[in-house]
């Protein structure tokens, strides 16, 4: 049985120490190193296969296998760990959110996970407009801390909900608002850093660097004791020798750098020139060093005043080059952002004005009227095809979501082909951007490649994912040729190979094309002064790995894996489905936003292994067979998937459409093939069968279930959590009631006079009142008669969720054989999880049966059917507030637009909770899942219900959601059909 999983109880949950076991197929950490490290630090270290597999990749094309992972507790832990690593010759890579796009957050030695413990905003000074943060602070957390003071941190990458300040400093991140507030380097005032070996330095603007505290000393404060190691080696530029290095190459440094706002590539050695404003700036020189010089333990950052109101001018142009040509002309109007994207990135119009490319120009003001006036001034000044000013916050969020999701959306071309980073974020002078894009598109065509440029047009910075073939030798060779030629094109336009995400493994090899051999050699000397042993992130920036080395696709199987689902979006290839996860880590967002669902188990535990990305990484390594060596029998993958609720939230919320619920079902099928399954799989996975057998004995079984000793024994045998209450069986099933209601059945055969209503297992045996209510409403609204259900039909949901896919297919085929719908006739399904199964799992498990696709296309929810087939019906007015839960499967697969419109017509006001209720079918009932299940409910649903005013209607169309509310809050929620039926038949 699965162990009891505990939800996170704070921002920095501790990890359990793991034994230093490593896969024999990949290098293992030496016992001496592991012992020395664990005796030197208080943080938790893990050298097991799971921890290593989770950190082989970031959001790039590259992969490096580490020896293990350390979660240091404080700066002293970092210093002590770096001392041990230098002594044993183990490389180190510091890792934040793991969203780097150039491969710099991967490494072959010890990974420092700075997100677990070092995530505190230590100080915030509104008067000075500064904050002191630890490196693992998530950007949105800093912004939330600053917001009450009217302040914010200016740089804001699209990964703001999960990227960390340490990672932003390492990459010199920028984001959409750099035209107003600059790069991260422009917003850092001081840094505490630790060199390889453990020496701590304090870097400050204009005052150089000084040693900071004794190496590895316990009890030292974050800023001291200053001078504990004296002043030897402290210079205005960094470690000993840096001053002399700069002084001996002044001419080269003064002429070797292009002048543009987004020059991120290489080391910023020109910041150490004596004529630099304010004097040599070691802080700026350190920013963007990608973890190759030292590890940040603390940063003092600048905060800026946040506009009290914002508006968004959206401008339409004929193409992206026209939009790029227009962008520089808008900068004099003082915008906060000038973002650009083309139509080939937009899957839905989402209210965009006419055009084939758009500029998003955000403006600010002290009042909404002032912000709107600025936006309208931009509209008047822009020579655009069309334009609009958006002041509604919800409308602005919807538009920004298109832009923020682009890093994931762009990984699939409109026809579904894969597209990858690799030439992700170059920058040219803004005035040259239109010309560059025209040349870039021509170069793509010359190489037979497709890409979708978008990005920070106001700063001349372009992001693009390209449909490289990174699997075949020929494709990789073309990837190299294209990268070399594009580097030359960027340089010809006076640009930088990296304009935001750093060089990493993706572009550092090409730096001589931008800077020349002499300046790049100087980069190596600078790195050696900081890190003489070469232990910090080797292969990055200085003496880099080749851009076509360490590609993460090379280890995957060359032939498609034999699987059960069809994976139609991935050409039937399970490895292709797993490759969907590019690592942008939207699933690691720690606070659910609005109606979003993904990823409830990560938000409950805070563990990477329980995020969608983490599970995808483990499946990737399972297919690779190097770190995880036992394939489908992997306990590492099984344990990570154990807390996947199969909510399907990632199917819609993940920008690339990862469907972990399907991958979990696939894995469980293979993992338990020929093996004894957990008891819950037999009990709840085959629930429809047991409920049919139990139906005639509902009354005595309900009585027995109320006897605590018998109920406890039954739950123990069935693998049910002891905290759960066994649901009450219906004493009259929905089918029996309908036959009685219709007096023995209906003889109406005309398709336009009947309604086909699916009798799902939950409605049939556990909540027939929902079915009765639906019949009443459907007959009233349409004038049609509900057909009696065909006995023995089942969608296969419980079999799929437990990975019993052979049984699921048998059940589904039997359903197709027995269910005789009129051609083109809709099927109304009341239970969202069953509707989602019929809509997606059915055709994906039976891809060769055309009846499966036909049935899937016929599925309608209750509200969808009413909207489509009773458009003139006037529902009763309820005129009261509503709260409750939108079912996660409804959100992910079916959408809830029709339900929203129906609630509006009924006069039900308010929003239903997003996220997941936490019960999620069998998940919340299984032993070991109680605490995570309850934590998921506490995230949105239970607080919303507690805060609801008296008289609020509690809605939940899903049986799981209603059960969770009943068992955790003692509140009865109802299906929307029940609420309407009650108004049609008062007192029923």
Image (spheres, rainbow, N blue to C red):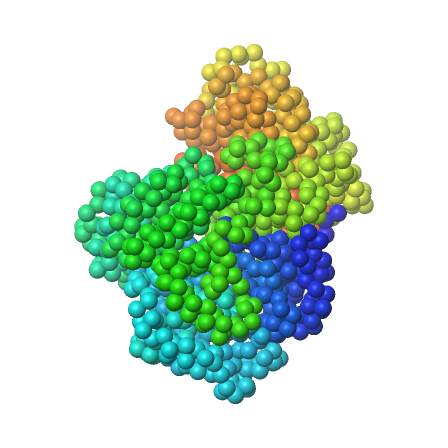
Residue 50 placement, left or right of 530 = right
Query: On screen, 62 above or below 356?
Result: below
Is any part of residue 702 visible from this angle? no
Q: Nearer the viewer, residue 980 or 306?
A: 306
The residue under the point 25% across, 43% down is 317
Q: Nearer the viewer, residue 855 or 860?
A: 855
Please provide percent x and percent y for residue 601: 59, 50
Please provide percent x and percent y for residue 919: 62, 44
Q: Quadrant of residue 606?
A: bottom right
Please provide percent x and percent y for residue 184: 40, 65
Please provide percent x and percent y for residue 37: 67, 70
Q: How many marks?
A: 0
Query: On screen, 667 above or below 821?
Result: below
Q: Quadrant of residue 176?
A: bottom left
Q: Quadrant of residue 815?
A: top right
Is any part of residue 216 visible from this angle? yes
Q: Residue at the front extreme?
A: 517
Quadrant where the C terminus is found in the figure? top right
Q: Nearer the viewer, residue 130 or 77?
A: 77
The residue under the point 48% across, 24% down is 780
Query: On screen, 815 above or below 296?
Result: above
Residue 904 placement, left or right of 59 = left
Q: Nearer the viewer, residue 897 or 978?
A: 897
The residue under the point 29% across, 58% down is 494
The residue under the point 29% across, 40% down is 356
């Amino acid at each position: 049985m699965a162990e009891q999983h505990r939800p996170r109880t704070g921002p920095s949950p501790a990890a359990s120490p793991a034994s230093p076991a490593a896969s024999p197929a990949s290098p293992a950490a030496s016992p001496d190193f592991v012992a020395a490290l664990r005796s030197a630090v208080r943080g938790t270290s893990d050298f097991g296969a799971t921890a290593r597999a989770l950190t082989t990749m970031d959001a790039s094309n590259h992969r490096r296998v580490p020896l293990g992972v350390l979660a240091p507790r404080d700066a002293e832990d970092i210093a002590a760990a770096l001392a041990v690593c230098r002594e044993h010759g183990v490389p180190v890579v510091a890792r934040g959110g793991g969203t780097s796009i150039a491969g710099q957050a991967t490494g072959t030695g010890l990974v420092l996970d700075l997100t677990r413990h070092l995530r505190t905003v230590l100080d915030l000074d509104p008067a000075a407009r500064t904050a002191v943060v630890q490196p693992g602070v998530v950007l949105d957390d800093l912004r939330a801390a600053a917001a009450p003071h009217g302040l914010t941190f200016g740089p804001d990458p699209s990964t703001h909900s999960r990227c960390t300040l340490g990672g932003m400093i390492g990459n010199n991140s920028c984001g959409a608002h750099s035209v107003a507030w600059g790069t991260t380097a422009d917003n850092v005032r001081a840094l505490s850093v630790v060199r390889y070996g453990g020496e701590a330095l304090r870097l400050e603007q204009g005052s150089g660097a000084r040693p900071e505290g004794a190496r590895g000393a316990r009890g030292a404060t974050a800023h001291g004791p200053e001078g504990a190691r004296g002043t030897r080696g402290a210079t205005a530029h960094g470690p000993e020798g840096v001053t002399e290095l700069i002084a001996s190459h002044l001419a080269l440094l003064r002429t070797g750098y292009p002048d543009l706002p987004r020059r991120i590539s290489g080391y910023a050695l020109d910041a150490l020139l004596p004529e630099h404003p304010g004097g040599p700036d070691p802080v700026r020189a350190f920013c963007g060093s990608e973890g190759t010089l030292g590890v940040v333990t603390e940063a003092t950052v600048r905060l800026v005043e946040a506009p009290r109101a914002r508006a968004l001018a959206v401008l339409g142009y004929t193409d992206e080059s026209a939009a790029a040509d227009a962008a520089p002309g808008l900068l004099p109007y003082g915008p906060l952002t000038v973002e650009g994207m083309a139509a080939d990135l937009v899957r839905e119009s989402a209210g965009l004005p006419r055009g084939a490319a758009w500029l998003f120009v955000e403006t600010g003001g002290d009042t909404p009227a002032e912000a709107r006036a600025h936006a309208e001034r931009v509209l008047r000044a822009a020579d655009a095809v069309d334009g609009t000013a958006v002041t509604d916050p919800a409308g602005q969020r919807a538009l920004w979501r298109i832009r923020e999701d682009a890093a994931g959306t762009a990984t699939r071309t409109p026809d579904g082909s894969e597209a990858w980073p690799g030439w992700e974020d170059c920058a040219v002078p803004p005035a040259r951007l239109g010309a560059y894009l025209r040349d870039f598109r021509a170069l793509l065509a010359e190489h037979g490649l497709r890409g979708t440029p978008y990005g920070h047009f106001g700063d001349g910075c372009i992001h693009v994912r390209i449909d490289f073939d990174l699997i075949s030798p020929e494709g990789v060779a073309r990837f190299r040729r294209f990268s070399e030629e594009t580097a030359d094109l960027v340089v010809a336009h006076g640009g930088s190979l990296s304009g935001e995400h750093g060089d990493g493994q993706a572009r550092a090899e090409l730096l001589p094309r931008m800077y020349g051999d002499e300046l790049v050699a100087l980069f190596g000397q600078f790195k050696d002064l900081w890190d003489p042993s070469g232990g910090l992130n080797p292969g990055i920036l200085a003496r880099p790995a080749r851009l076509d080395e360490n590609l993460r696709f090379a280890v995957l199987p060359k032939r498609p894996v034999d699987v059960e689902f069809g994976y139609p979006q991935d050409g039937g290839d399970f490895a292709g489905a797993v490759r969907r996860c590019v690592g942008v880590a939207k699933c690691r967002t720690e606070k659910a936003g609005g109606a979003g669902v993904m990823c409830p188990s990560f938000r409950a535990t805070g563990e990477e292994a329980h995020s969608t990305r983490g599970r995808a990484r483990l499946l990737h390594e399972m297919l690779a067979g190097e770190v995880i060596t036992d394939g489908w029998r992997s306990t590492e993958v099984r344990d990570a998937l154990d807390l996947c609720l199969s909510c399907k939230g990632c199917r819609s919320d993940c920008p690339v459409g990862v469907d972990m619920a399907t991958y979990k079902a696939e894995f469980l099928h293979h993992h338990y093939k020929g093996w004894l399954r957990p008891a819950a799989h037999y009990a709840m996975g085959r629930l429809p069968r047991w409920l049919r057998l139990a139906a005639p004995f509902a009354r005595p079984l309900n009585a027995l279930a109320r006897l605590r000793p018998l109920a406890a024994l039954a739950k123990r045998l069935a693998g049910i959590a002891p905290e759960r209450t066994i649901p009450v069986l219906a004493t009259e099933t929905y089918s029996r009631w309908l036959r009685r209601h219709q007096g023995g059945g209906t003889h109406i055969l005309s398709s336009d006079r009947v309604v086909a209503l699916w009798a799902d297992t939950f409605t049939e045996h556990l909540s027939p009142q929902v079915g009765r209510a639906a019949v009443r409403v459907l007959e009233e609204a349409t004038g049609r008669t509900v057909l009696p259900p065909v006995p023995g039909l089942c969608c296969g949901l419980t079999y799929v969720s437990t990975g019993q896919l052979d049984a699921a297919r048998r059940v589904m085929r039997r359903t197709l054989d027995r269910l005789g719908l009129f051609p083109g006739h809709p099927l109304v399904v009341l239970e969202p999880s069953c509707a989602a199964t019929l809509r997606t799992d059915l055709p994906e498990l039976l891809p060769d049966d055309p009846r499966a696709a036909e049935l899937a296309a016929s599925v309608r929810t209750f509200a969808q059917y009413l909207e489509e087939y009773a458009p003139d019906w006037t529902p009763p007015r309820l005129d009261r507030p509503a709260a409750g839960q939108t079912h996660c499967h409804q959100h992910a697969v079916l959408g809830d637009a029709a339900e929203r419109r129906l609630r509006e017509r009924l006069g039900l006001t308010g929003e239903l909770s997003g996220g997941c209720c936490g019960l999620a079918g069998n998940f919340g009932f299984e032993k070991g899942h109680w605490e995570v299940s309850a934590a998921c409910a506490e995230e949105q649903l239970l607080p919303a219900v507690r805060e609801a005013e008296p008289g609020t209607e509690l809605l939940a169309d899903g049986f799981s959601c209603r059960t969770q509310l009943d068992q955790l809050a003692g509140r009865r929620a109802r299906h929307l059909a029940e609420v309407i039926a009650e108004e049609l038949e008062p007192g029923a």
